[in-house]
Image (cartoon, rainbow, N blue to C red):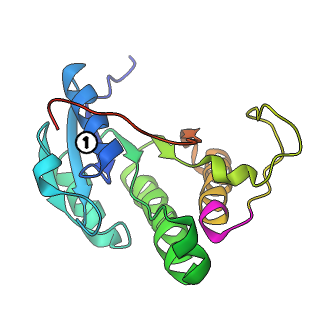
Amino acid sequence: MKKTLKNILVTGGAGYIGSHVCKELHKKGYIPVTYDNLSRGNKHAVKWGAFEKGDILDKANLLKVIKSHNIDAIIHLAAYIDVGESVKYPGKYYRNNTLGGLTIIEAMCESDIKNIVFSSTAAVYGIPKTLPIVEDSPKEPINPYGFSKLVVEHMLADYAISNDIKSVSFRYFNVAGADADS
């Protein structure tokens, strides 16, 4: 019998995209659990499910939250996203985005979670040689932000083989909008 996925951990759920994802999950009958350290998110944006304060680099806390909320799948949106800042402070981006991604994947494996949606970036393409950019266009990032996200995509592919992790990566260009509920 196929298990219905209900409890979804949304890392970065207090951010702009994360809060909208939680709202849509709630509307569709899922139970979103926001996991955010609030370094760039806003607690007031968490309206559609439980809130757990925590950092994606803290595997012990991730495991505790996953277990206490009986998490079925993860939507990983927690990342630093400023390209200029990534050039000035590359270690900050590799630590948070790349090592944080690995920490989440390891927590998934230890908790037998098999499904993740990863918020990547169009910055993995770098400067395109042809337009329009399509999914299989060459991935040649030109800054630490793009590299930090591409490495996580590669890790997810490796863990698909070793641990049967199923993932989808979204490569956003620009995100904009407004919501009366925000």
- At x 19%, y 27%, the residue is 26
Q: Position of residue 15 (x, y in %)?
A: 29, 51
Relative depth, front residue between 108 and 179: 179
* Element at label 1: helix
**Horizontal side, residue 53 vs residue 146: left or right:** left
Displayed quadrant of residue 132 = top right
**Is the C terminus in the top left, top right, bottom left or bottom right quadrant?**
top left
Residue bearing the label numbered 1: 19
Relative depth, front residue between 13 and 42: 42
Q: Is residue 131 above or below residue 157?
A: above
- At x 87%, y 38%, the residue is 130
Q: Position of residue 58 (x, y in %)?
A: 32, 73
Q: Is residue 111 above or below residue 20?
A: below
Displayed quadrant of residue 70 = top left
- At x 67%, y 46%, the residue is 161
Magenta span includes 145: yes
Q: Amino acid under label 1? A: Ser
Q: Is residue 44 above or below residue 36?
A: above
Q: Position of residue 150 (x, y in %)?
A: 66, 56
Magenta span includes 37: no
The total of numbered circles placed on residues is: 1
**Is the N terminus in the top left, top right, bottom left or bottom right quadrant?**
top left
Q: Which residues are magenta?
A: 142-146
**Horizontal side, residue 35 vs residue 126: left or right:** left
